[in-house]
Image (cartoon, helix red, strand yellow):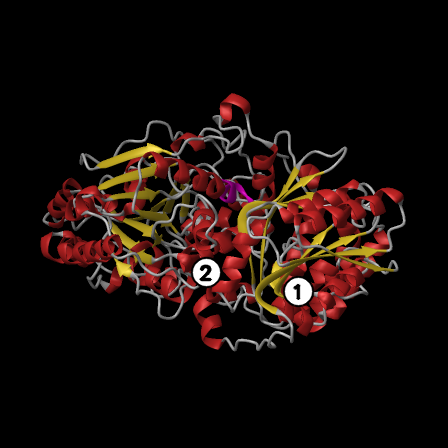
Amino acid sequence: MKSKSRSHMVIVEAYEGFIEYLSDEPEERESMQGLGLPVEEIAEYLDCRITILGWDQWYRFEQRETWVPTPATRPVLQPDFSNPPSAFTSPRLKRISIPARDPDYGLLFNEKGLSPRSYGLINDSGLLFFASYCLNKELQAFYKKDPFHIAIMPMWGGVGYVAQMARATQVPDTVNVPFVVVVTDKSINRQLANQEGVWTRHAIIRRQMEDVSLALADMSLVFGPRGKEIADAGRLPGASAPVCVPRRIGNSLLDKIARVSETPAGIQMPLQFFLYEPQQASSGVLTALDAVTLLAGQGIYLKRPMISAGTSMTFAPMKPREFPEYWSSRGAVRELIREHQWEWRKDYPRLEQVFPVRLYPSFFDHLPNIWAELARGSLVLLSPAAAEGLAPGEILPREVLIQGDPLPENVADCLKKIAGTDITKLDQIRRELCLRVLEAHRENRRNILVGEVKEALEQMLYFRPKPQDLSRIALIFLDRRMPLRTLVQKDEPPSLSALRPGARKGMLSVVVTCYEMGVMIKESVESVWASERQPGEVLLVDDGSYGEETLGRIKELEQYASEKGLPLKIIRQRNQGLASARNTGLKAANGEFISFLDGDDIIEPQFYQIALKILEGHPRLGGVAAWACIFGANIVDGFWNAPQPEFPFLFIENSIIVPCVTRTELIRSLGGYDARQRYNYEDWELGIRMLASGWPIVTVPMHLLKYRVRSDSLYRSMTDVQNQVMRELLFNTHRETVSKFAIEVAMQLENQWKTIAYSNSISPLPDQHHNRDASFHKILLKTTKRLLTWLSSTGNDINLV
């Protein structure tokens, strides 16, 4: 419980720079500050301090240090985001930038650049993942300096993901405060509209970040019915209901809207439709273009050309061409321009002596500032995304709403109706809309909504909420095409056999496998003994080692364990391979939990403590993994920052890092490791089997394993033929599950193949470091076409989102 007078909240803004461009209009960017929340009113109601964390310092590095070369719709020219105007005057509020500081070096990006780990995070998982990782570090530092009691995050972009997962998995030094997520829109809506592809690696990870961030939140804030629908679908049944909050809007802007609501327009003025948005499909520009084309095809012509103005963007499917340039080269658009039905412009159009009607036919929107356009005296036509939060609690005039999704036919129908209505009637609609906005944001109605938000936050300050159930949230990883609520409602938890006689509840068995590891086996076992929570037994399975150094090291370990009373049992067998050695250890294990560790890898002291606490508290989880550092002789250090293992992505890439801690009886019930997977695919295959059996796995966002890469390791020495055989065996073993996700798997393989085939056309990251083996990419290029053909032949009609 916290005293009101000492309460302090932190609000983290969404990342809205060059790579995630929304707008560079000063008034629009100002309205996005503080996530569009009525922060001054909230601070006053709660008598608390609020610190707003923005990303201003980060934006200047986007075309150098943090560049991400993935297909995306971006401005042609670098916008100027320097010196953003402050939207706040209250002494209770402070807005500062999140330092553009490398988490490894502890220095600003321009002092030493980025560390290899940072480049790996960006290259493998995207800029937003790296931002989320850095944000977690900065929140930890900020909390120690100036403790806060609630953290409010944006769902869009998922930047709260690492901090929230760290809290959910109880990693050391986590910021253990309630998290609130503000729901505006989902990245997939923008990506689909911009035709950027939604089954690329970065898009999959970003979607996972957003969905997990929402699901883990202690409370969700929404601005209207669209956000409520997203929040309801993405949270657990029984989670707190979304709280509707009004958008921040200044009194001066409301005064302007009040004045234009009282000022009639000239009835003799011609109608002028226009858009002023970034020139991209998600803003609705392409939809409007298609709508005007449809009308022209029906013989319906606008009296004045539709004006499309705004920041010029590259068109992702046709990079590096600009959006207006590309579409102006198409015959149908050239005809519209020639017939004076369409006109491209750069700047906001001059709207003198016309009745202006601004279109907002967007599929995606994040905190649009439509009030500013109303204050200019324009009528507006709104998609459901654009109308969100405009006038909460009020029924908007039907004429200003694009009915249904902003598809070309719906926009064309709306344009036709407006064009056929006389100016006097349209002006009445405009003035009525202004009055509805004023009614929603003036004293009584607004105070009710802000009061509800105040009560919800106050309750959270006084009584810390119970964390969301991580094991139920993890069900989302079993099928990423479906919303969390649906998966939980359909869940039929698989049964698990009782512990066998002699097994010890709560005990961890660690199976360390060894074949000619030399001194490395000593380092590996000693790292297990150094764990904060020691295992009850350590089973060292020697798979037929014969060298004196290895046998000598094993003998030393045996003697040391005997002297110090440390757990160690040596099991020797003829050489049968890694899978067989692990199954030997599985058969001998007496613990409720089990972890398999390769004899050349090293475990960090905290891992078993963290993993066991999660598994003991969440019986629905199948296993717990973590991130890994990659090291070895003659290689650059790397980092395996695996996303959460999920279907269908798990068929493309093994994202479960050994030593995953799991349940002994679960692995036994699944039959142990598949000895047919003899070339290092046995871990991957078992992870797929666990998820396919209904047992999700979670990954702790912390580097808790040191994974050694050796020149003679199974993976490094794998030939193209061996990889081909193993991948075919993997897919055929899980043919039924692969077929279920055939279309999504095919699209992901296609993306990887194209990325490799046309890698020369993609600008690499500066001084790029990554942890993937080049031989896998070479092999993938050779085999993907055959896999695509097979997968496509097995697929059914599947909802891709």
Q: Nearer the viewer, residue 422 or 91?
A: 91
Which quadrant of the view contains residue 723? bottom right
Query: Where residue 212 sits in the image (x, y, percent)?
Result: 46, 57
Q: Which amino acid, by three-letter code, is at mark 2? A: Gly
Residue linked to disc 1: 688
- Magenta region includes residue 126: yes
Q: Is 724 on the left-hand or right-hand side of 51?
A: right
Which residue occupies 39% across, 45% down? 175
Q: Is residue 407 above or below residue 369?
A: below
Highlighted range, magenta = 125-130
Per the image, the residue denoted by label 2 is: 297
Q: Which residue is more in the foreground, 403 or 140?
A: 140
Tell me: 760 left or right of 146: right
| Above or below, 41 relative to 411 | above
Q: Residue 289: x percent and y percent?
A: 44, 52
* Residue 21 in view (yes/no): yes
Instruction: Of the two numbered discs 1 and 2 on the same chain, state the one appearing first in sequence.
Output: 2
